[in-house]
Image (tube, helix red, strand yellow):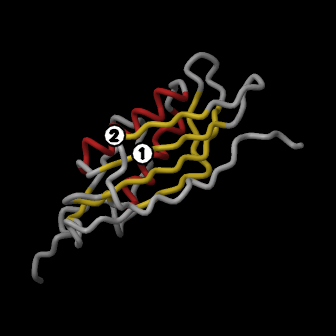
């Protein structure tokens, strides 16, 4: 059988256990089929979970990752497994958010990336964390992330 650009993927199409830690997770990439084209890729993880590093209690967030690919794309199953690896990882909201963004930047070297992490309240205070690599590229259609600020039940 002829070799393809997807032969290096180790997780797609197979049973893959959730990594025990984010450090153990493997972010896989594939070549961008449209290099040089300005377009946005969005991943949304509305049920992200990590642990408070002090109490061990679960923390929950709605995470939105937007990026403009350059030469590679992140493979979505590897991203799902990477995000799931935070389930048993103790870190503050800010640390989790920036760690996710930096791993993605390191793995695929996008033209531009931003992350919005909308954390649900603990102790009565919701925390939202935002980061981006730089200004968005000129001419990029950049829709709102669509996550309202926390308003409680009212």
Q: Residue at x 18, y 68 (%)?
A: 7
Q: Residue at x 61, y 23 (%)?
A: 56
Q: Earlier in the sequence, mark 2 or mark 1?
A: 1
Q: In the rendered view, does 29 fall on the left or right side of 118?
A: left
Q: Residues within 10 Å of mark 2 (few under 14, many from 20)?
A: some
- The picture places residue 40, in percent across and down from the top left corner, at 39, 62
The N terminus appears in which quarter of the rendering? bottom left
Picture quarter containing residue 11? bottom left
Q: Residues within 10 Å of mark 1 (few under 14, many from 20)?
A: some
Q: Which residue is mark 1?
A: 114
Q: Which mark is residue 133?
A: 2
Q: Which of the two residues, 20 or 121, is positioned nearer the viewer here? A: 121
Q: Residue furthest front?
A: 138
- The picture places residue 144, in percent across and down from the top left corner, at 56, 55
Q: Residue furthest right?
A: 154
Q: Residue furthest left?
A: 2
Q: Are marks 2 and 1 in contact (CB under 8 Å)?
A: yes
- The picture places residue 117, in percent across and down from the top left corner, at 55, 40
Q: Secondary structure at mark 2?
A: loop
């Amino acid at each position: 059988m002829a070799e393809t650009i997807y032969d290096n993927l180790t997780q797609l199409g197979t049973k893959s256990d959730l990594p025990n830690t984010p450090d153990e997770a493997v972010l896989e990439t594939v070549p961008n089929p449209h290099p040089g084209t300005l377009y946005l890729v969005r991943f949304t993880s509305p049920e992200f979970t990590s642990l408070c590093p002090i109490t061990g209690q679960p923390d929950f967030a709605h995470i939105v990752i937007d990026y403009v690919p350059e030469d590679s794309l992140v493979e979505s199953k590897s991203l799902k497994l990477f995000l799931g690896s935070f389930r048993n990882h103790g870190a503050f909201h800010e640390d989790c958010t920036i760690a996710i963004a930096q791993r993605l930047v390191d793995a695929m070297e996008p033209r531009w990336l931003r992350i919005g992490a909308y954390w649900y309240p603990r102790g009565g205070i919701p925390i939202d964390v935002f980061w981006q690599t730089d200004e968005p590229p000129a001419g990029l259609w950049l829709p709102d992330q669509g996550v309202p600020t926390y308003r409680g039940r009212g």
